[in-house]
Image (tube, helix red, strand yellow):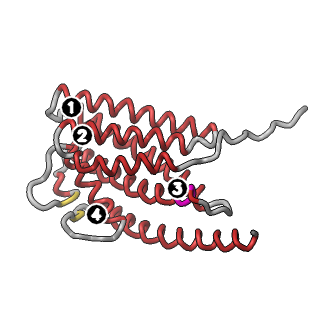
Amino acid sequence: MDAIAPAEPRKKRSYMLLLVTLAALGLAYPVLGSGRWGAVVWHFAFWLMLLASVRACAEHRSEFRLTGTLAAAVLLLGVITVAWRTIEPTETTGLLWCLFVLEALALIFLIYTTWLLLVDVMGGYVVNVDKLFGAVCVYILIGLSFAELFMLFEVGAIVFGIDAHEVLAVPGEQATDSAVRKGELLYFSFVTLSTLGYGDFTPVSPWMRLFATVESIMGQLYLTILVARLVGLHLVQNTRS
């Protein structure tokens, strides 16, 4: 009986397209809270990032299937949510539940994608431009993942009848529109990840404080370990050549 050959990789990972879509997502951030069409523009950029992430993680069939399935579910729920908001601007209970499931699936997708990219970036013995692109993508995806986690807490607090002020305190009046609130949480996430700590947003609940602390520690450790790893790989690469 012939031995079964191991599955061949589908293709070599490439992070250029993913980095471009992440940059486009960042450029779309200022319009996120500027009305209905601003939210549509940001969500369209987010969907492009999902597709680029699937392409970047499609090295093996199992990874491609799982990331593709999660991305398809997020895309479908995202289109339903955007269409629902267009027809009914008021955030009803049904829309909030749809948002809750959407944020949960998006969080799972981002965590899994970030892990796949992190393993690839930290592995191997070759340092090239594409690997540097991948390292930047991982850092941005970590910030997006925590923003989705915070948004999941926010929507969950509303769905389950918890005062949103008990989750994250903000200056002035609490935003009621979920798109505006997501923009605030994206800002809070990257300020925390980079340890800037402006102090204009303050986590209130113990869980939010825990995750904000974990994010700030991860941001510092990632950059420290990444630089050490890349320098080590560069020295090994020069020695072999």
Mark 2 or 4: in front is: 2
Mark toward the start of the polypeptide (1 vs 2):
2
Q: CA–CA distance between discs 1 and 2?
A: 10 Å
Mark toward the start of the polypeptide (3 vs 2):
2
Tell me which segment is drawn in magenta.
130-134
Q: Are marks 2 and 4 in contact (CB under 8 Å)?
A: no
Q: Give the number of the disc on residue 206.
A: 4
Q: Which residue is mark 2?
A: 39
Between 233 and 190, which is closer to the camera in this rendering?
233
Q: Amino acid at mark 2?
A: Ala
Q: Which residue is mark 3?
A: 134
Secondary structure of the residue carrying tag 4 is helix
Q: CA–CA distance between discs 4 and 3?
A: 33 Å
Q: CA–CA distance between discs 1 and 3?
A: 34 Å
Q: CA–CA distance between discs 3 and 2?
A: 27 Å
- Mark 1 neighbour density, 10 Å: few (under 14) some (14–19) many (20 or more): some
Between 186 and 176, which is closer to the camera in this rendering?
186
